[in-house]
Amino acid sequence: MSPLAVALLAVVALASSAGAFYVPGVAPKDFDKGSPIEVRAIKMTSTHTQLPYDYYSLPFCRPEGKVEYKSQNLGEILRGDRIVNTAYQMRMAEDVKCALLCKDPLSWDAKQSGEVYYRY
């Protein structure tokens, strides 16, 4: 057996014995019943252009207070992901059938939204 095959076999054997893996910048978090869950948005993409849109460049409901941009790790910063908070409010293990997100009606009509999607 060649040395390359032996090395490959050793790597596969070691990798298969591992019971877990670690993704840099991602850590597990425990939630108790009723604890708030933060819902974040990253970006909006289009099939018509390669450039992503900022989440709030479209008329989504904004959170009370201020919009906060945050990046969690180096990979997100290098990819240009602008993680932003949203107006959605969720709690762990609590069912909510329907809730009002914001009171302001969207002021854009179909023509305006089409201009956003198809503008180059």
Image (cartoon, grey):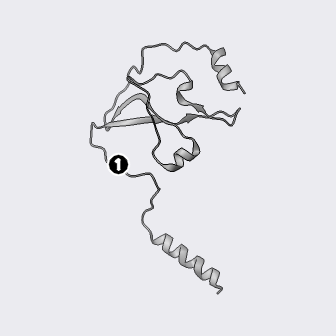
Q: Residue at x 27, y 43 (%)?
A: 32
Q: Is residue 103 left or right of residue 49?
A: left
Q: Position of residue 88 (x, y in %)?
A: 41, 28
Q: Quadrant of residue 43?
A: top right
Q: Is residue 2 left or right of residue 58?
A: right
Q: Position of residue 17 (x, y in %)?
A: 45, 72
Q: Is residue 106 left or right of residue 88?
A: right
Quadrant for the C terminus, please: top right
Q: Residue furthest left?
A: 33
Q: Position of residue 8 (x, y in %)?
A: 59, 76
| Mark 1 burial class by Cα count in 10 Å: few <14, some 14-19, many 20+ | few
Q: Residue at x 67, y 20 (%)?
A: 114
Amino acid type, callout 1: Lys
> In the structure shown, which secondary structural element does the residue marked by tag 1 occupy?
loop
Q: Position of residue 31 (x, y in %)?
A: 30, 44
Q: Is residue 59 above or below residue 31?
A: above
Q: Quadrant of residue 11?
A: bottom right
Q: Residue furthest bottom?
A: 1
Q: Quadrant of residue 93?
A: top left
Q: Residue at x 31, y 48 (%)?
A: 30
Q: Is residue 100 above or below residue 12?
A: above
Mark 1 sits on what residue? 29
Viewer-proximal residue among 64 and 92: 64
Numbered circles on residues, count: 1
